[in-house]
């Protein structure tokens, strides 16, 4: 079974600085999707960014970008120019290639604090 | 605006009582999911449904039941057999259960035991 690990339970960053959240996963598949979701204090889960495993180019969404290292099974999230609104729990998730619904695996999350 | 509506936002359960959490979506999505979130942990899958009138157990289905009689609705019942029901419950949907589809989430229901 696939597993997702986020080794940093908590992190903090100064406003306007850059921070990187780590995620590693375990899989024997070659084709899959990876996601970063943000959960602010409202607890609404919001998609931040999505990466397709067969694409070598790292995904970017405005201030958010990923460093996808397929061989190392690593999928880190970089937040540039951090803002107070970025403070949230961040979950890394893996979606396996099978067609069943039981195919989304979430990591335990990293709580990010943004310091003014 | 399309989205997923969960109700109630807060729910309290008495000993031996069954309670039902509502989840409605108007996104015309085929697949729907229920996740449980405990403090300091990620999301764990309770049940999922790929199409109407079909649903499958997830990793922690014991003590829970679901139905999928309509495409837009996927209610979750927390039965008295669930001995530790206090948690935050999230409903989600996706266009289909295909690998490329992201999950859309509702705003959640916090269930507590009285």
Image: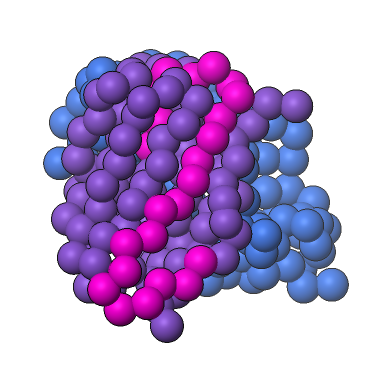
Residue B56 x/y as whole percent: 21, 33
Taking the spot 60% from the left edge, 41% from the top edge, the residue there is: B5
Describe residue B2's horizontal placement relative to residue B109 as left or right.
Answer: right
Segment tinted magenta in the rendering: B11-33
Up the image or down, B14 lies above or below A47; here it is: below
| Chain assigned blue | A
Rendered-image quadrant of the N terminus of chain A:
top left
The stretch drawn in magenta includes residue B15: yes
Residue A43 x/y as whole percent: 60, 58
Q: Can you see residue A74?
A: no
Report the number of numbered marks: 0
Q: Nearer the viewer, residue B60 or B71?
A: B71
Up the image or down, A29 lies above or below B7; here it is: above
Describe residue B82's horizontal placement relative to residue B104 as left or right.
Answer: left
Up the image or down, A41 lies above or below B27; here it is: below
Describe residue B2's horizontal placement relative to residue A107 as left or right.
Answer: right
The stretch drawn in magenta includes residue B113: no
Q: Nearer the viewer, residue A75 or B66?
A: B66
Residue sticking out furthest to the front: B17
Residue B7 x/y as whole percent: 57, 51
**Hue of chain B?**
purple
Taking the spot 50% from the left edge, 25% from the top edge, the residue there is: B72
């Amino acid at each position: 079974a696939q597993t997702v690990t986020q080794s940093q339970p908590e992190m903090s960053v100064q406003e306007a600085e850059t921070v990187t959240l780590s995620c590693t996963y375990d899989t024997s598949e070659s084709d899959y999707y990876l996601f970063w979701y943000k959960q602010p204090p409202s607890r609404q889960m919001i998609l931040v960014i999505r990466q397709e495993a067969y694409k070598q180019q790292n995904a970017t969404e405005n201030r958010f970008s990923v460093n996808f290292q397929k061989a190392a099974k690593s999928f880190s999230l970089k937040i540039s120019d951090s803002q107070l609104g970025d403070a949230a729990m961040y979950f890394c998730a893996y979606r396996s290639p099978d067609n069943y619904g039981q195919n989304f695996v979430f990591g335990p999350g990293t709580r990010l604090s943004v310091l003014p | 605006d399309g989205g997923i509506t969960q109700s109630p936002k807060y729910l309290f359960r008495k000993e031996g009582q069954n309670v039902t959490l509502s989840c409605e979506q108007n996104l015309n999505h085929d697949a729907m999911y229920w996740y449980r979130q405990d403090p300091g942990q990620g999301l764990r899958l309770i049940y999922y449904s790929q199409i109407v009138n079909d649903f499958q157990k997830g990793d922690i289905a014991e003590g829970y039941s679901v139905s999928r009689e309509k495409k837009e609705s996927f209610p979750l019942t927390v039965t008295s057999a669930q001995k530790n029901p206090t948690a935050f419950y999230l409903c989600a949907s996706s266009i289909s259960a295909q690998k490329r589809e992201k999950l859309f989430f509702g705003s959640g229901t916090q269930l507590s035991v009285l």
